[in-house]
Image (cartoon, rainbow, N blue to C red):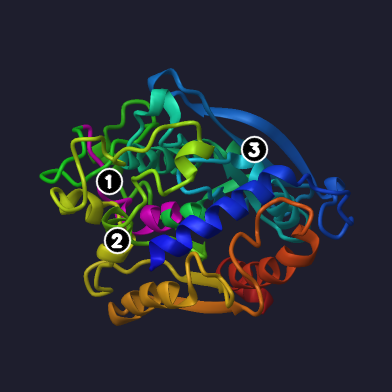
């Protein structure tokens, strides 16, 4: 049933986003006088594939500022950081945060050879880059939050749940660990893991896909998933044609936050905010609530907010952003402020 919903909705959403162009925004949503912007900052080039981020820094003398990293959605197959431009501008206008809007590789990149574990390697690498370099942009590397929508929420949750599993060796069922696309000079992947180099202080997960094992059991890797065609690629397994969820379940569970929630007595995760639209039929409230329950059953700190009357992708840059996104972003900013600026409460 989920695969049927997935097929019908992602095509509609993807075409709508592709066809819309943002209109002039009100100053309350985007005030460039409130921030400086460093565009397309190169942070890594895995296999010669350049990855960049846009960095927004508040204008003022109150730094260093907490940092919010944004990872875009798109089924790991389409979109880039530009789909989060309006969200980044809103946060930079209305909050006291350095905002990093980050690109990562897609499955269809590098001749349709990128694997899901490599994408996680990209996002954990970007966290390591930010921790090493963000002070140059007025950010505090010890005060870091991650966020994203849909696939980006999955990647943010992977940073939180799986970021302690780093390795220079290939990802496999015997080595469920990720090779960072960026490492500071003279640091190994194991040293980064041992020093808790990917640890963050908060996560905001919007209508996330938290179970890649469940997707692998469905139609995600087949022609029934239109994202492959929208991404200009032929369908295949997310780890290559030789793998699927039935024959290699460990690989799929290894990249699934739902299957990797530690007990708080073993490893306390940062506070997390989960959001979803009440009318989302792609990543439904029930699916997000299932992940919320996993977190709470493990003793982890998690909050939940439903956006009444909204479906999927309400945070994406498009003409409806001004009507759809601000109420959700205000909830997210309130959560961030409670984590990073508790004295103002």
Which image quadrant is residue 110 in? Answer: top left
Please give the name of the residue rendered at 47% of the width and 66% of the height, measured from the top-left corner: 283
In percent of width and height, residue 14 lies at 60, 48
Relative horizontal placement of residue 120, taking residue 149 as reference (left or right): left
In percent of width and height, residue 313 lies at 61, 59
Q: Which residues are magenta?
A: 155-168
Would you name the residue on which mark 2 appears?
214
> Which of label 3 and label 1 is nearer to you?
3
Do the residues bearing badges 3 and 1 touch, measured as CB atoms within 8 Å? no
Calculate the distance from the C-alpha at mark 3 to the C-alpha at mark 2.
33 Å
Image quadrant occupied by the C terminus = bottom right
Q: Compare residues 128 and 78 and report the one nearer the observer.
A: 78
Would you name the residue on which mark 3 appears?
54
Q: How many marks?
A: 3
* Element class at badge 1: helix
- In this rendering, the answer to whether 42 lies above or below 271 is above
Would you name the residue on which mark 1 appears?
193
- Determine if residue 201 is in view: no
Calculate the distance from the C-alpha at mark 2 to the C-alpha at mark 1.
28 Å
């Amino acid at each position: 049933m989920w695969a049927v919903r997935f097929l019908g909705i992602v095509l509609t959403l993807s075409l709508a986003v592709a066809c819309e162009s943002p209109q002039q925004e009100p100053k309350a949503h985007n005030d460039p006088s409130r921030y400086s912007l460093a565009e397309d900052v190169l942070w890594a080039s895995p296999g010669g594939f350049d990855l960049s981020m846009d960095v927004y820094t508040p204008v003022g003398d109150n730094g260093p500022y907490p940092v919010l990293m944004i990872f875009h959605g798109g089924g790991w197959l389409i979109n880039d950081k530009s789909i989060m431009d309006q969200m980044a501008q809103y946060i930079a206008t209305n909050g006291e945060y350095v905002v990093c809007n980050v690109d990562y590789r897609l499955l269809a990149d590098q001749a349709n050879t990128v694997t899901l574990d490599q994408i996680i390697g990209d996002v954990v690498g970007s966290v390591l880059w930010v921790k090493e370099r963000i002070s140059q942009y007025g950010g505090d590397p010890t005060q870091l939050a991650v966020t994203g929508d849909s696939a980006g929420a999955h990647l943010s949750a992977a940073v939180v749940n799986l970021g302690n599993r780093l390795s220079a060796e290939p990802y496999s069922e015997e080595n469920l660990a990720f090779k960072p696309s960026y490492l500071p000079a003279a640091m190994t992947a194991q040293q980064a893991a041992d020093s808790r180099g990917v640890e963050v202080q908060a996560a905001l997960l919007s209508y996330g896909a938290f179970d890649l094992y469940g997707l692998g059991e469905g139609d995600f890797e087949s022609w029934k998933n239109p994202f492959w065609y929208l991404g200009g690629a032929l369908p295949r397994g997310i780890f290559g044609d030789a793998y699927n969820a039935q024959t290699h379940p460990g690989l799929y569970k290894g990249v699934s936050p739902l299957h990797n929630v530690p007990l708080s007595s073993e490893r306390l995760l940062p506070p997390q905010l989960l959001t979803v639209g009440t009318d989302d039929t792609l990543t439904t409230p029930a699916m997000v609530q299932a992940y919320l329950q996993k977190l709470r059953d493990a003793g982890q700190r998690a909050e939940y907010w439903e956006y009444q009357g909204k479906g999927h992708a309400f945070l994406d840059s498009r003409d409806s952003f001004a009507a759809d996104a601000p109420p959700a972003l205000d909830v997210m900013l309130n959560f961030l402020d409670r984590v990073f600026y508790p004295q103002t409460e």
